[in-house]
Image: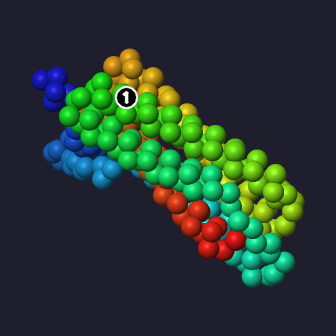
Amino acid sequence: MVAEKKKEAGISNIDSGRIFNNGGGGGAGGHSYSYALPVNPAKFGLWLFISAIIMFFSALTSAYIVRHSAGNWLKFNLPPIFVVNTLILIFSSVTIQMSYFRLKRNKLSEFKLLFLFSTLLGVSFLIGQLIGWEQLKNMGIYVSTNPSSSFFYLLTWAHAIHLIGGVVALVYVLIKALFGHYNSKNRLGVELCITYWHFLDILWIYLFIFINVTI
């Protein structure tokens, strides 16, 4: 009886079925129908946010290409630390995906350990970026040195800002995990965080290749 009332109210559990109906009854002048929400609202919101970031970086790289073609473009070699940072970020995607596999199997201790390790790798990447920027300054490459250096700092700073947000999300999820919030049946927050982290990894690989090809 209670279940029937909940169904008539209009919404069932989003994660389990994502079924909605209009709350109308049958009979004369009435109609009743139900439909499945194609995607979880939180996941939909995340993909909207990711789409906005893609458009933002597409605009930046497009402006980069236009300015590059105009000439007066200083070429310089990136310090090797940026290669190391790239490898660190790729490895963090591997470990964070491994943590998710452990969560699905309800191996919570291994999940927390791998998730913590991934978070530390993310922090290490940011520290490595700081070191790389400092090394560039020691080489005499500043923001105002040339349009090429200006775009390099702009692209890498913009990525770092988004990655800081990702690290904050990792820490937030990790804290919730330590308090036992997640398990094999409750993992939406982890999925969202991991999806965003993989995106940041792919975005950096794209930027790293793009910059090295065009710098």
Q: Quick one: quadrant of the N terminus?
A: top left
Please tell me which residue is depicted at 32% across the width and 41% down the height of the picture.
98
Rendered position, 104 above or below 183 = below
Mark 1 highlights which residue? Answer: 113
- Of residue 126 and residue 175, the one placed in the foreground of this image is 126
Please tell me which residue is depicted at 76% across the width and 55% down the height of the picture.
136
Q: In which quarter of the image is residue 42?
A: top left
- Of residue 68 and residue 94, the one placed in the foreground of this image is 94
Instruction: Give residue 30's position: percent from left, percent from top.
Output: 22, 47
Q: In this view, does 47 lie to the left or right of 80?
A: left
Q: Quick one: quadrant of the C terminus?
A: bottom right
Rendered position, 207 above or below 111 = below
Secondary structure under tag 1 reads: helix
Please tell me which residue is depicted at 15% across the width and 45% down the height of the picture.
27
On the question of residue 23 being in view, the answer is no
Q: In which quarter of the image is residue 26?
A: top left
On the question of residue 120 being in view, the answer is yes
Q: Hey, what amino acid is under mark 1?
A: Leu
Q: Is residue 46 left or right of residue 27?
A: right
Rendered position, 85 above or below 178 = below
Please tell me which residue is depicted at 22% across the width and 29% down the height of the picture.
106
Q: In the orientation shown, which residue stands out farthest toward the left?
A: 1
Colour setup of the view = rainbow
Instruction: Give residue 99's position: percent from left, percent from top.
Output: 33, 37
Instruction: Give residue 177's position: percent from left, percent from top.
Output: 38, 24
Q: In which quarter of the image is residue 14?
A: top left
Q: In the orientation shown, which residue stands out farthest toward the top?
A: 179
- Of residue 187 and residue 71, the one placed in the foreground of this image is 71
Callout count:
1
Q: In the orientation shown, which residue stands out farthest toward the right?
A: 144
